[in-house]
Amino acid sequence: MIASEQPYNFIIVSAGVGGLVLASRLCEDATANVLLVEAGPNHMGDLHVETPGLLGAMFGDPDFDWNYLTEPQRSNQVHANNRQMGQPRGWIVSSFSALNFSIVAYPSHANFEAWESLDNDGWEPDAMAPYLRKFHTYTPPSETTSALLSLDQYMKADNQGNQGPVPVCHPDVYTPFNQTWNETPPGICWGLLRPGRRTAQKPHLFTETMVERVALTKSDDGQVTATGVQIQTKDGEQLAVSATREVFISAGTLNSPQLLDLSGIGAADLLKKHSIPVVLDLPGVGENLQDHRVVQPLVELYEKTRPGPLTGMPYLDSPQVEQFSPGRQQQYNILRQMLRDDQTGSAQYMFLNSQVNVKPGVSTMAYALSKDLPENYISIMALLNHPFSRGSIHIRSANPGEKHVYDPKYLSHPLDLEVLARHTQFLDRIAGTQPFSSLLKPGARVPEAAVDLADLEKAKEVVKDCLFHDFHPVGTYAVMPADLGGVVDPQLKMHGTRNLRVVDASIFPLETSGNIQAMTYAVAERATDMIRSSAHH
């Protein structure tokens, strides 16, 4: 191991959303010396990255995607018929934001209230609202589109950002599909590419460089200090790089736990099993994994030869409940309250003008978005907002190059299956109700029309067969007290450490009702203020 001659004030592991925001904001201080280390390459200028419509082409491509695969999904209670599901994660500078669908969906007021109730002072809605505004600049749509979307009913202009670096707007596209969907019985926004803002200086960026471990020391009082990182460059050279102030883990919900396990922070039994010296016994590392579950029946549109508003739409080608820990039980109590609240939706409904396909065995994201059926199908989707099931991410060995054990345990809590099945029934009723049903071919759907979705047990089987995820994994470094299974404190410092913070979606103690990218921007903006505040004390 060769020691790098240059120390840095701050070292940030991974150039994802959290890491890039941190690096940019810290570099506003011209005296700060910041190192940003990314395992993947820098594809800036690549048309795959800078053309939003090509995002599907990157799923499963090893030049862009870690392409993780779940363990077979089964449990003693409920299961997803032993299926394995692919989970795309960006192996690239900007991480999964390069593969994402360019959608901003904000968390709800209730989400932050729930976080705060888990002993997280300072995470209440009023405290977080400024950070949701800080990262973006919102441009309203035309008056015509605004009226068609009824934006005045659910969007307030003063809740939107007006000075942030990320541009956000609504697409000026509103099809008959949208209109019939809305008439049958918020906020999807799209970011446009434009040059970013310049900081006083740039961080040092190492690409195609794997962080193998965080270097740690332990003092007599038991507190752990991060002194730097051990890295392997793309040329195979191993270096030790030191940090004089703080180290930040921003490698994401799936990658961050592996790094800390390898560094000696995690469940002691697991570390000893792999002959890793235990620096800090913190059993919550890698636990509490959550993700939005999605079930997506397919419905067929009119034949292409028949006139109608959608006939020419394009395809996108590319049990018994276990005994719970006090922390898990407290989370469940909060989720039950949210489910009973008629102002807090238990699911979101979406549609895609493409097929979302799953199959027995292995279903990758690339396959899910492929055109598997020859007919003109679309997907109507129910997304579970508040999952009760909890999974985990842990090392498979002490080898940094070996992929971890990724087991989300989808449907391991029976309530997830119950809620999704009932939403599947409701979507089936929508598909049969005018005016939406007028756009669809009668009796043509997947699962086949012979399956009676009015039967709840049959609807549950459809959920098991059709289940996928919405690639929103969170929770493996939850911001909660350690005795509740948490890993970081409200200042995002890892319990038992002086200067090791986590800034990514893994700190979410509970899944949000929006997508996770907007919330990760806000978390990173807030983390920057925390760092600046601590520097003055």
Image: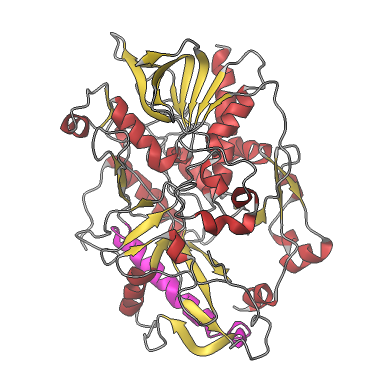
In the rendered image, residue 520, in percent from the top left (x then y), is placed at: 54, 40
Can the viewer see residue 282? yes
Going by the picture, which residue comes out furthest to the right?
Answer: 143
Of 157 and 176, the residue lying toward us:
176
Q: Is residue 190 above or below residue 392?
A: below
Q: How is the image coloured?
A: secondary structure
In the rendered image, residue 181, in percent from the top left (x then y), is placed at: 62, 75
Does 118 sit left or right of 323 as displayed?
Answer: right
Of 481 and 10, the residue lying toward us:
10
In the rendered image, residue 403, in percent from the top left (x then y), is placed at: 32, 42
Can the viewer see residue 187? no
**Predominant SS along the magenta part:** helix
Q: Which residues are magenta?
A: 410-439
The answer to whether residue 437 is magenta is yes
**What residue is shown at x 38% (from left), y 50% (from top)?**
290
Does 511 sit left or right of 456 as displayed?
Answer: right
Q: Is residue 119 above or below residue 375?
A: above
**What residue is shown at x 55% (from left), y 71% (from top)?**
354
Query: Which quarter shows the N terminus?
Result: top left
Q: Is residue 482 above or below residue 416?
A: above
Does 447 sit left or right of 283 as displayed?
Answer: right
Query: Which quarter shows the C terminus?
Result: top right
In the rendered image, residue 361, in percent from the top left (x then y), is placed at: 29, 66
The answer to whether residue 361 is magenta is no
Number of labels in the image equals 0
**What residue is shown at x 55% (from left), y 24% (from top)?**
530
